[in-house]
Amino acid sequence: DAGITQSPRHKVTETGTPVTLRCHQTENHRYMYWYRQDPGHGLRLIHYSYGVKDTDKGEVSDGYSVSRSKTEDFLLTLESATSSQTSVYFCAIIDDSSYEQYFGPGTRLTVT
Amino acid sequence: QKEVEQDPGPLSVPEGAIVSLNCTYSNSAFQYFMWYRQYSRKGPELLMYTYSSGNKEDGRFTAQVDKSSKYISLFIRDSQPSDSATYLCARGGYQKVTFGTGTKLQVIP
């Protein structure tokens, strides 16, 4: 499983509240990613990071911000959650040696 | 047009059948091709990864890439009920990996 954990695994929050999701990896890979998965849309990239404090936007970055202050942690923040951000969020890494992408177990977020 | 197109299914086959899953893509810029398997309420699991045209085999699974027609295929031989899952194709590189929407497969005992 490439040592990827996500927290929390499930969260219900109200519209307008801030939410932070955490991705933790144990193997210090350089590239980390946040995706969301929705029916009919598949997996879509929100943001990615290619090193500590180095991040860039994906195709659905509006309403999301990220931070990476340590190699092992990549945080995704919804500054003011909206119902359209109800989704399953996956963190992923690319293995530095094999170049293969591995996913975490996911966080199911519901915004009411 | 989506960069990666995949029939969502569902696809239902009897146990032991050969399964063929297919995707098409529209952008030739990226050269990595992947297949993932995703069980219900789990994260995607990498099945096959290739950087070239042609076939790659791993046990009962064969991935095929035809760059001339921009076609990606996954074949599953002797399908098992445990193969019942959603299969995602993907292509890309470090900065961008684009996924198909997934094909749901059910293998009936």
Image: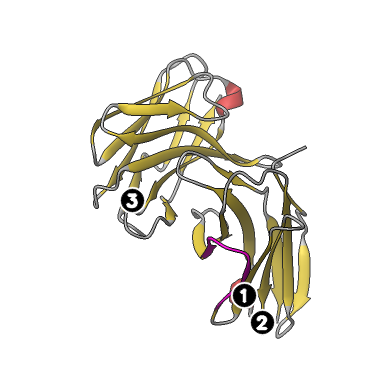
Q: Amino acid at mark 2?
A: Arg
Spot occupied by residue A77 in the image (x, y as percentages of width and height): 40, 24
Front of the two marks 1 and 3: 1
Q: CA distance from mark 2 to mark 3?
A: 31 Å
Q: Amino acid at mark 1?
A: Thr
Q: Amino acid at mark 3?
A: Ile
Asked if the residues shown at circle 1 and circle 3 are in contact, with their CB atoms under 8 angstroms apart, the answer is: no
Residue wearing tag 1: B62
Task: List the single residue furthest toward the front.
Answer: B68
Residue wearing tag 3: A4
A84 on left or right of A26: right
* Residue at 73% from the left image edge and 74% from the top image edge: B19
Location of residue B104 with respect to B4 vertically, above or below: below
Asked if the residues shown at circle 2 and circle 3 are in contact, with their CB atoms under 8 angstroms apart, the answer is: no
Subunit under mark 2: B
Q: Which secondary structure lies at badge 3?
A: strand
Crowding around mark 3 (Cα neighbors within 10 Å: few <14, some 14 to 19, many 20+) is many
A16 on left or right of A67: right
Q: Is residue A40 magenta?
A: no
Residue wearing tag 2: B77
Using the image, tell me which numbered label, if any, was put on residue B100.
none
* Circles 2 and 3 on the same chain: no
Front of the two marks 2 and 3: 2
Spot occupied by residue B72 in the image (x, y as percentages of width and height): 69, 61
Q: Earlier in the sequence, mark 1 or mark 2?
A: 1
Subunit under mark 3: A
Asked if the residues shown at circle 1 and circle 2 are in contact, with their CB atoms under 8 angstroms apart, the answer is: yes
Front of the two marks 1 and 2: 1
Judged by its main secondary structure, the magenta piece is: strand
Q: Nearer the viewer, residue B70 or B97?
A: B70
Q: Which residues are magenta?
A: B49-57
Q: Which secondary structure lies at badge 2?
A: loop
